[in-house]
Image (cartoon, rainbow, N blue to C red):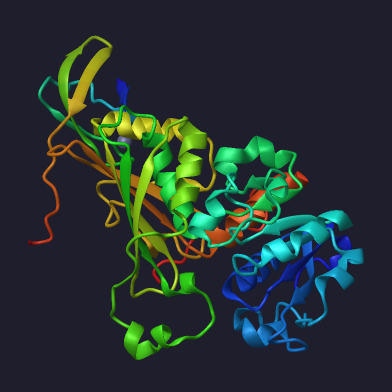
């Protein structure tokens, strides 16, 4: 199964045994997604919260 | 000297004011252009000297010498003239060049602003040829490609204006909370040209971050004009320009006050620049370069774009990075000229950026 990155548009492979709540990463832009629902051939994802870089400030 | 000989090239070009940095960058890029040969390079200051003495990057690539003769005496063998002269000087050349039938690529600001009334306000002179402004096309291929196909005269955008327009235009169609867009520009020292004055002494310049134009920068009306052209929106640009410790490159950081999110924002950028070869969207969260940075664009004709979302104040922090000498001047000039002549649009411009540099 696969889905599309909402940021850069690249394909993201979704392993067949994936479950809702698991995280995916776009291989192109590195965006992290959380699987919100998965059934049959359809998978829904939403952006996962990222920890930003703070340069030690 | 090392590639196809001049006889096989399609057109011959002259450069007026060829000893400056912009002229040198035109010479450098055109040395690698399959369809254009530069046969005339004028300079009063360096007449009869070898071009490579002043532009040492061209050693071994050209045996051209600067000429002190008037370009008007040399037009018989020229198809196109690049005017790499200061603002307020191109207007002295353009009418007679037009009469001769030669095509013109003007690097100065003299024919960029569609509204002649802006010239006294921003450049301090009444435009003597308001009717001729209409004959020029603004040399930004991503916005004006169709007009460039039928152009004979090109007005090449300013460097800070380019980076700003590229990074603001896709977002200016949003529902703005404020029609003021602030732009913070950080500019390499080559942006101020090859003429020496006291402010450019190494000891004064090195390690400094100098706010050289905190207000009233001349590229302001150009940015407003092109955002209006691209989106139909009247925006006000609040531009402050700083000279920083690098030779080439510009980073503009623009604040656009509107509510959006990352997904919608990237969608706007991807749609606006779909198919554009020289626009790169910097979006890799795993890269050491998560946002546009002049360091990874210098030497190339790319413009790198990216943004961050400030949720606290509903602001898009939009970045544009270019090599000020290339996408900010000579690169856009050549890309626009390629379109005007129907050449391959990327001819002479495909060199990747230098990294690390
Ligand atoms: Zn992606």
Q: In the image, what residue occupies the spot 88% across and 58% down?
A: B100
Foreground: B50 or B110? B110
Q: Quadrant of the C terminus of chain B?
A: bottom left
Q: Nearer the viewer, residue B244 or B268?
A: B244
Q: Residue at x 31, y 42 (%)?
A: B180
| In-image side of B29 versus A47 (left or right) | right
How many tags in the picture? 0
Q: Residue at x 33, y 72 (%)?
A: B244
Vertical comparison of B112 with B51: above or below: above
Residue B87 appears in the figure:
yes
Question: Does residue B86 appear left or right of residue B37 in this picture?
Answer: left
Q: Is residue A24 left or right of residue B29?
A: left
Residue at the farthest left position:
A57
Residue B23 in which image quadrant? bottom right
Of B83 and A2, the residue lying toward us? B83
Asked if residue B246 is positioned above or below residue B291 in the image, the reply reads below
Residue sticking out furthest to the top: A40
Which residue is farthest right? B76
Quadrant of ligand 1: it is top left
The image quarter containing residue B79 is: bottom right
Figure check: B229 above or below B133: above
Give the residue displayed 23% in from the left and 17% down from the top. Answer: A43
- Left or right: residue B142 versus residue B310 is right
Residue B321: percent from the left, percent from the top? 40, 56
Query: Which percent across, then down, holds residue B342?
Result: 76, 44
| Quadrant (top left, top right, bottom left, bottom right) of the N terminus of chain B | bottom right
In this orientation, does residue B351 appear?
Answer: no
């Amino acid at each position: 199964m696969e889905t599309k990155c909402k940021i850069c548009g690249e394909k993201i492979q979704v392993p067949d045994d994936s479950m809702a709540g698991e995280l995916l990463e776009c291989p192109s832009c590195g965006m992290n997604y959380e699987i919100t629902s998965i059934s049959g051939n359809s998978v829904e994802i939403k952006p996962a919260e990222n920890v930003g870089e703070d340069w030690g400030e | 000297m090392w590639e196809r000989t001049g006889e096989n090239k399609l057109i011959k070009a002259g450069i007026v004011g060829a000893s400056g940095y912009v002229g040198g960058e035109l010479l450098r890029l055109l040395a690698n252009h399959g369809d254009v040969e530069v046969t005339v390079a004028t300079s009063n200051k360096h007449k009869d000297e070898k071009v490579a003495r002043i532009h040492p990057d061209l050693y071994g690539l050209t045996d051209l010498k600067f000429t002190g003769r008037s370009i008007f005496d040399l037009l018989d063998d020229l198809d196109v003239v690049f005017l790499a002269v200061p603002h307020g000087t191109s207007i002295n050349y353009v009418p007679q060049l037009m009469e001769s039938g030669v095509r013109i690529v003007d690097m100065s600001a003299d024919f960029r602003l569609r509204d002649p009334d802006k010239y006294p306000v921003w450049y301090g002179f009444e435009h003597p040829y308001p009717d001729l402004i209409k004959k020029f096309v603004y040399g930004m291929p991503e916005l004006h490609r169709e007009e460039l196909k039928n152009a004979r005269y090109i007005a090449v955008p300013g460097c800070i204006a380019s980076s700003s327009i590229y990074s603001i235009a896709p977002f200016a169609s949003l529902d703005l909370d404020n029609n003021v867009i602030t732009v913070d520009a950080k500019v390499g020292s080559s942006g101020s040209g090859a003429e020496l004055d006291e402010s450019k002494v190494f000891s004064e310049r090195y390690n400094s971050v100098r706010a050289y134009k905190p207000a009233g920068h001349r590229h302001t009306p150009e940015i407003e004009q092109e955002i209006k052209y691209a989106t139909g929106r009247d925006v006000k640009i609040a531009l402050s320009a700083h000279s920083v410790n690098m030779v080439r490159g510009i980073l503009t950081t623009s604040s656009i006050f509107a509510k959006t999110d990352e997904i919608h924002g990237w969608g706007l950028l991807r749609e606006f620049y779909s198919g554009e070869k020289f626009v790169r969207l910097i979006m890799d969260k795993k890269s050491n370069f998560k946002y546009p940075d002049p360091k990874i664009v210098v030497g190339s004709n790319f413009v790198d774009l990216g943004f961050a979302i400030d949720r606290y104040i509903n602001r898009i922090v939009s970045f544009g990075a270019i090599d000020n000498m290339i996408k900010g001047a000579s690169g856009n000039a050549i890309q626009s000229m390629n379109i005007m002549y129907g050449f391959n649009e990327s001819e002479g411009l495909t060199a990747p950026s230098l990294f690390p540099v």
